[in-house]
Amino acid sequence: MAATMEASSVKPHVGKKKKPPKRYWDSSTEDNEQHTKKSSQDGESDFNEENVKETQESQNADDGQAYSISGSQDPFPGDAPIPEEKLKKFRRVEKSKGTSGLRSKLKEAIKRSEVESELAQKQAARFDLLLPEDAGFLEGDEGEDTCTISQDDIADAVDITSGAKYFNLHLSQFGPYRLDYSRAGRHLLLGGKQGHVTCIEWQTKNLMSEINVMETVNDVKWLHNEDMFAVAQKKWLHIYDSKGVELHCIRKFNDVLRMQFLPYHFLLATASATGFLQYLDVSVGKEVTAINAKLGRLSVMTQNPQNAIIHLGHPNGIVSLWSPNQKEPLVKMLCHQGAVRSVAVDKTGTYMVTSGLDKKLKVYDIRAFQPLQSYFLPAGASCLSLSHRGLLAAATGDIVQVYRDVWGTPVTKPYMAHRVRGGVSGLTYCPHEDVLGVGHSGGFTSMIVPGAGEPNFDAMDVNPLGTQKQKREWEVKALLEKIQPELICLDPTQLGKVDRASWQQRHEERVKALGYDPLAQDKFTPRMRKKGRSSSGAVEKRKKKVAHEDQRDVIRKTVEEKMEKEKEQKEKKVAAVGAKGQRSALDRFKK
């Protein structure tokens, strides 16, 4: 009976569910479950071996030994090497040499900035291969000079789009013409001497506006974008929009002959027949400064794109460099024995090319202010212009000659030559295009000059393909980042450096402020006293007392010196009065 009770207590109260009958499709799943159980048991033993293999592979990858999927070793591990020349091309700043006396946070910030600049330099050098365009020059056959190739032959040889860039505008009624291209290089501004002013989108040949101001036009210049331009008329300076509507007439700027626009400062620099150099802030419409050059009529003018310094040519053969911060020229250079006819400065601000009445063409290094090359032209050069790639265009009469690498080896013959319909009055290269614009008495000519333009533009600065929205955003950004005219100087790199005054200069300034030299005598060191009388507070009191006494002595000496000087002056006055004559009774009331 007991055995039956024990057996009944072991049995569960609720019976187990029976498994359903097997089906033919369940056989494979059970086999898989059994196989997984076995593999899991075997996998536990092999787990350590796989981990060891993975760690070895990761260590090899860290050591630069990259493995492919097949397990073979990579023959070229790591990143591809970058040539040193390309790294130098995109180098921004040099690494800081000494950071020993700086704080830890400042050290970390400097290291972080150096790492970021180095990464940007490497990325720019790698992506330099992906630039879509490259500059190419004109090459002739064996024994053929490139200067003998005509513009018609070049237009026939190139594609239709490039061939359309060579054209002529016959405008003989209102010439000679001055011209200017917009910074993006898509719009052309022409101004005739007899008052004809027109704006053209020259690539599509669309006419934007055309007016006649009924007055002599000396020069025309685009402002910060193609919506506004300035016209130097006979009397005053006028501002127009792209539709030809007059916006402003600035009567402070009279008799203007030449103009230059500084895009990063929003300044319009003008040179007048009265000898004044004036600066107009276009963003607010106010005159910044007016400088009298004191060198006669100013008809030759250009700017240095690198530091915004204005170069003026004068009738006595001098080229002067000007900044709006000083009333005197920064540099004066005697370049020619006769009057200066034209001046041009390259994009990097390194070289300056001048031409004069002495029929010489000279190349100067602006960094050292020394001549590099000197050429003799039989008829002299009346107009000069330098392209982004360093091609020099010189106009002699009705012939335009293009020279290549004029500041390197001496040039014996021109790179290209072209004859126009009349005397040349203006030369300008189109930005980012192999095009040279020539203004002459017969109208305007657009020449194709292979290799003149920089093909790869910076879209963050100037975007020829930008939409209207991008142009508006760029204008707002440029106004917010406008550089003040006070920062214009010969060496812009000096603006980023700290002017650390020496210890001697600081000491001299301190002596002038105090009236005495606090370091002239040895500092007072109080002797040690006992019974608690040499506490820090008591020692400081004694030091201050001695310092005040020394200061009183200095002040007493200065007062005594002043009293002695006053007595001497009074005695001199009395002696002077006695020398004139005897004193009267009323002299006693004089003070």
Image (tube, helix red, strand yellow):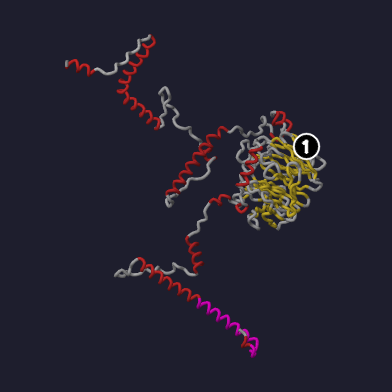
Q: What is the quadrant of the N terminus in the image? A: top left
Q: In the structure shown, which secondary structural element does the residue marked by tag 1 occupy?
A: strand
Residue at the (49%, 65%) spot, across then down: 510
Front residue of 398 and 408: 398
Farthest residue toward the right? Answer: 173
The answer to which image quadrant residue 23 occupies is: top left
Counting every numbered tag in the picture gives 1
| Residue 558 against residue 143 in the figure, above or below | below
Q: Position of residue 461 (x, y in %)?
A: 61, 41
> Which corner quadrant holds the C terminus?
bottom right
Q: In which image quadrant can residue 377 be found?
A: top right
Identify the residue at image location x=55%, y=35%: 128
Q: Nearer the viewer, residue 450 or 453?
A: 453
Q: Residue at x 53, y 79 (%)?
A: 563
The single residue placed furthest to the front in the displayed view is 1
Image spot of residue 112 (x, y percent): 46, 43
**Please, is residue 554 above or below residue 492 in the view?**
below
Image location (x, y in percent) of residue 261: 68, 47
Taking the magenta stretch, the answer to whether it contains residue 291 is no
Instruction: Name, please, the residue furthest toward the left.
Output: 2
Residue holding disc 1:
169
Principal secondary structure, stretch drawn in magenta = helix
What's drawn in magenta, residue-wise?
559-586
Q: Amino acid at mark 1?
A: Leu
Decide if residue 517 is in sight here: yes
| Residue 467 relative to residue 51: left or right | right
Q: Is residue 249 above or below residue 460?
A: below
